[in-house]
Amino acid sequence: MEAKSQVFYISDDQYFFPSGTPADMETYYRVVYPQFDHERFIKMMAQFDLDKKRKLRTFSKGMKKQVSILLGICANTKYLFCDETFDGLDPVMRQAVKSLFAQEMTKRGMTPIIASHNLRELEDICDHVGLLHKGGILFAKDLEEMKIYIHKIQCVFREEGDAERAFEELEILQQEQRGSLYTVTARGTREGILQKIQETDPLFAEVLPLSLEEIFISETEVAGYDIKKLVF
C-alpha cells in the first residue's frame, strides 16, 4: 500500500463515479493518497475554470482529462503514469499541462511516465524515451543522446557514383533521392558522417534537424516495420 501511494495513474479514459463530481473524486483520492493537497486542488480547479460540484458525466472529454490531471498533480505522488495525457486537450491547455509537469519535476522531483502516439508532444517534456514494437522494447535511450548519434543529411554530388562511395561506409537507416538531391538518415556522429560525405567533394551537404518522429520511423524500419507496406 505504501508503494501504491507513490503512484498515480491517468488513463486515456479515466474512471469516475457514475454520478460523481470533481469534489467527490477528490474526497476519494484524499483517502488513498495521504499527501493530497486539498487547498491546491480547489485553487487549480478555479484557475482552470472547472466547477468542482458539477456532475462529471456532463463534462467534455477535454474537461474530464483536465480534472484527471489536476487530481494526479495534487495527489503529490512521486510517479505519475500517463496514457495519452494530451489527447482531447486544445493547444493552449496542452502547453499549460506541460508547464505544470515541468514545475512539479523541478519543485518536488516528480517523474511523469508518458505513453503517447503523438511523439511531437514528448520532445518538449521528456528527457528519456523508449519505443515499443511488437510487444517488446525496441530501444530505451536518453533523448539528447539519440539526437547526437542519429542525423539527417541532404546532399548533392558532382558525379553519379559519388553517392554510392559516400554512403558505403555509413550506417544508413533511411535513404531517399529526388532528382540529384539525396536525403539520408544515418547513425553516427555529426562530424563523422559529414567527413565521409565531404571526402567525395559534394556540391552541397547540410545536416538538418531530426525530430523524434523521424527517429522513430527510422528505427522501426530497421526492425522491419516498413510504412511502405501499409500504403497502397
Image: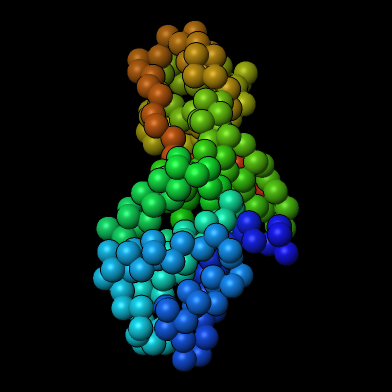
| Residue placed most toward the observer, 175 or 178 | 175
Q: Position of residue 79 (x, y in %)?
A: 59, 53
Residue 225 drawn at (x, y percent): 63, 52
Residue 215 visible? The answer is: no
Q: Position of residue 90 (x, y in %)?
A: 31, 64
Picture quarter with the N terminus? bottom right
Q: Position of residue 154 (x, y in %)?
A: 40, 27
Is 121 or 10 nearer to us in this picture? 10
Q: From this viewpoint, is residue 56 visible?
A: yes
What residue lies at 50% left-to-right and 90% top-to-bottom?
18
User: Outermost residue, bottom direction?
Assistant: 19
Number of labels in the image equals: 0
Nearest the viewer among 76 and 168 is: 76
Q: How is the image coloured?
A: rainbow
In the drawing, does residue 62 fall left or right of residue 226?
Answer: left
In the image, taking residue 5 as reference, residue 76 lies left or right, namely left
Q: What residue is shown at x 35% (from left), y 83% (from top)?
A: 53
Q: Name the residue rendered at 36%, 78% in the picture.
A: 52
Q: Is 154 drawn above or below residue 94 in the view shown?
A: above
Residue plotted at (39% across, 61% down): 40
Q: Tell me: residue 20, above or below residue 185.
A: below
